Amino acid sequence: MRDCLPARFALALALLLTTAEAIARAQEELAIRTVLLSEHPSDSAPTLYVKGKVATVLRFETSVDPARTRMLAWEGRFEPLLAGGRKVVVEPLRDLGEDEGVPLLVTLANGKQVPFLLKPAEEGGRNAVDQQVNVFEDPRGYDAMYSTLMDSLKQRRALEDENHRLREEEHSADHALATLLAQGNLKHTPFTRRQGWRLKEEGADILVEVLSSKTLPKMAVLFTLTNRDAKKPWRMMEARLSTVSGGNSRAFALRMQQEEIAPGAMGRIAVVADDSAFQSPQGLEQLALELFRSDGLSQAYLVLEQRFIRE
């Protein structure tokens, strides 16, 4: 005889999961994260990822003791610490340096001390800024399990969206062309070099090449970047393609030769855009292509015109 849930319980479970997924979707843009405290002495303090002029709220199950909650060496780097009720609020005055870390010690009303380490968030990376962190002592409690479920659903949705994006890119001709360019295989593409510039930016030398094709209504831009920083690898935060007049975003394909460029090393970044990106109800538009490194600094900016495709 089969074991099965009564229909009413199965329906209730389905409704619960559907409701939980809807709440998780609503929280995705709020950067809410769950931290479960460990009693093991060898475990390190949880890391909180913070960003300049963005408040990070820690929310506990019990009240905190404001008099015994403190940051170390925070002067000049953070707003004064706010602690009261079940919350602690930290806000950096500026972005922390890549190697900076600020200890935070939260003391609960029951006397328990909970250490944290404040580190800089990574723009567009895995360690995004924490806007709210729900902290739980008992991982088996209802609130802790529910908050963990929300995190799991958000992570699942992020993975599903990423997989969907990757599947679409697998069938994208523009991404295939960008991959060839990033790998240095210009001769295997229909593109030829139209214009080029050499830029000397902070920590990087960049060769910018604009490419066009006689057979396809497309254009490409190839960045060949040499990292001149003696210590830190070069990482990209994002590339933006938008209209010069209104700042409206345009679709494009992007590929990098590698995720990061080591000190003294060289890497390529390729962008491919279709002719339609220049079209608008008002007529032809100029497009601005801008490249940002991981700390938000603009590394290259150029204006593109449709004549690069037509010539």
Image (cartoon, rainbow, N blue to C red):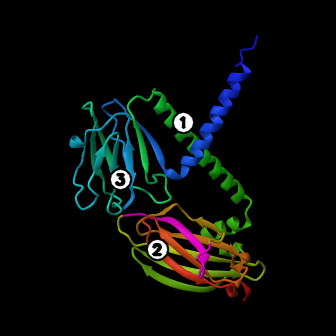
Judge whether residue 190 can be spotted in this image: no
Circle 3: residue type: Lys
Res 149 label: 1
Q: Nearer the viewer, residue 246 or 266?
A: 246
Q: Is residue 121 magenta?
A: no
Asked if labels 1 and 2 touch by Cβ distance under 8 angstroms, the answer is no
Horizontal side of residue 38 vs 147, given as left or right: left
Q: Residue at x 74, y 66 (%)?
A: 173
Q: Residue at x 62, y 67 (%)?
A: 254
Question: What residue would you read off at disc 2?
Answer: 298
Horizontal side of residue 66 vs 268, given as left or right: left
Question: What residue would you read off at disc 3?
Answer: 119
Horizontal side of residue 19 vs 47, given as left or right: right
Asked if labels 1 and 3 touch by Cβ distance under 8 angstroms, the answer is no
Residue placed furthest toward the top:
1
Highlighted range, magenta = 232-248
How far apart marks 3 and 2 lie (CA) works out to 22 Å
Image vertical order of residue 138 relative to residue 162, above or below: above
Q: Residue at x 38, y 64 (%)?
A: 232
Mark before the other along the chain sequence, 3 or 1: 3
Q: Nearer the viewer, residue 171 or 53?
A: 53
Mark before the other along the chain sequence, 3 or 2: 3
Q: Nearer the viewer, residue 186 or 89?
A: 89
Circle 1: residue type: Leu
Task: Mark 1: give few (<14), some (14-19) or many (20+) Cα within 10 Å.
Answer: some
Residue placed furthest toward the right:
215
